[in-house]
Image (tube, rainbow, N blue to C red):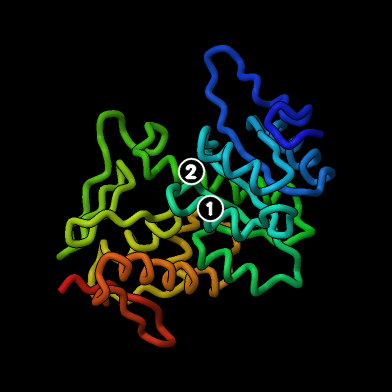
Amino acid sequence: MSDSASDPADTGNARPVGATRQTIALVDDDRNILTTVSIALQSEGFATRVYTDGETALKALLENPPDLAIFDIKMPRMDGLELLQKLRETSALPVIFLTSKDEEPDEALGLALGADDYIAKPFSQTLLTARIKAILRRSELMRGGSDVAPAGKLPDTIARGRLLMDPARHRVTWNGKPVSLTVTEFLILEALATRPGVVKSRNQLMDAAYPDDVFVDDRTVDSHIKRLRRKFRAVDNDFSAIDTLYGAGYSFSDG
């Protein structure tokens, strides 16, 4: 098995005439996982690309982005955390992490670096497929896809004080300065900004970001909120629009 998308497990890249298949990139040094996951995803109608190390994957993901990527954490040459960190310098590509049960600190760090989700090994193919489809639907929504919005009608922009959100183009600015958000971060912020001053519980924010009955625990939302604050403070040191009400949840202040 080679490190590139020309691998035999990558036969899903051949697209039927007239069809558009979403592409999933798999990055893992375990060749058995690459093969089994790739075959499972192809049976669900996805095209797949496989890579066995982070360095090779980074170059390919930036030059020819897929629709979503799945990273293992423990890999040679460049691990999944470093790969995500470098990817996030220029790309908001949806990313799911594969982790082991004893890697909880890595899960939290992965979310802090901008991962959209994580799945602990061993995992079922059904769960992985459900998470992938949920994130892809959210990503399509951000692009104003015709399968989630009436033809010719794009989601309205959201203006709240210094915040401007454009769901159709997945663009966010604060004081006129762009802020790059992942799909999950965007949907959490949108849920808060839609009703300024209203406290949203973690469960409500999880429902907004994960609307497909996919289980996500509380610390996932907390990690995304921390990441949101860090990104906005990178363009405005005084950013304080996301408030925490301990024991209740979060709210957005547009004052």
Quadrant in which the C terminus is drawn = bottom left
Residue 84, given in percent of the width and then of the height, sits at 56, 55
Q: Amino acid at mark 1?
A: Asp
Task: Give the mark, 2 or 1, whose residue is nearer the N terminus.
Answer: 2
Q: Residue at x 66, y 54 (%)?
A: 78
User: Alpha carbon of mark 2 to alpha carbon of mark 1: how far?
Assistant: 9 Å
* Foreground pick, 85 / 17: 85
Classed neighbour count for the residue bearing mark 2: other residues with Cα under 10 Å, few (<14), some (14–19), many (≥20): some
| Secondary element type, mark 2 | helix
Is 239 displayed left or right of 129 in the figure? left
Point out residue 112 in the picture as x, y percentages from the top left corner.
Answer: 51, 67
Q: Nearer the viewer, mark 2 or mark 1?
A: 2
Q: Which label is found at residue 137?
A: 2
The residue most toward the front is 77
Residue farthest along the top direction in this orientation: 17
Q: Which residue is mark 1?
A: 212
